Amino acid sequence: MTIFTKIILGEIPCYKIAEDEKYFAFLDIRPLSAGHTLVIPKKETDYIFDLEDDELQGLIVFAKKIAIAIKKAIPCERIGIAVIGLEVPHTHIHLSPINSVHDLDFRKAKEIPKEVMQEIADKIKAQL
């Protein structure tokens, strides 16, 4: 069982943004910027391109809704998207508010206080 499945099951706390029957979105605890969100399928699949076509399509459509809400809640030029897939063996998409290409540098992750993380999550959820 991956750490993400434990988050979905409520065994590990998170700043949940949204979920439906197949997908789940929550704030990254080591964000590149305020609003950096992870979008995952509830079904554990290690590699994004091992998802069935309909699962991949559903994941992207779910991520689009989350990205639109992030953009409304967090002032930025765009919502950057990245799939690296090496950190946790559970498919995940990074959605991060960006103003330049350099804002997607994963070596520059930040610490954001818990109270602020909850405020950010609430602002994004309010836009869904």
Image: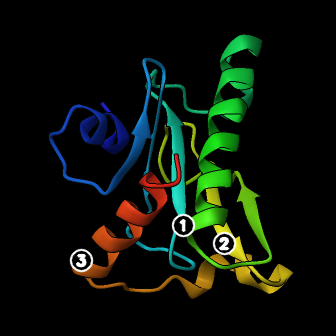
Type of amino acid under label 2: Pro
Q: Nearer the viewer, residue 126 or 80?
A: 126
Q: Residue at x 57, y 44 (%)?
A: 92
Disc 3 from disc 1: Cα separation: 14 Å
Give the labeled residue for mark 2.
Answer: 97
The residue labelled by disc 3 is 114
Q: Earlier in the sequence, mark 3 or mark 1?
A: 1
Q: Secondary structure at mark 3?
A: helix
- Which amino acid lies under the numbered mark 3 shown in the image of this protein? Lys
What's the amino acid at mark 1? His
Question: For mark 3, does the 10 Å Cα neighbourhood hold few (<14), some (14 to 19), or many (20 or more) residues?
Answer: few
Position of 1 relative to 92 (above/below): above
**Residue reaching furthest front?**
126
For label 2, the SS is strand
Q: Please state the horizontal and vertical placement of residue 102, each as a whole percent of the image.
A: 79, 85
> Label 2: few (<14), some or many (≥20) within 10 Å?
many
Residue 94, placed above or below residue 18? below
Q: Residue at x 43, y 52 (%)?
A: 125
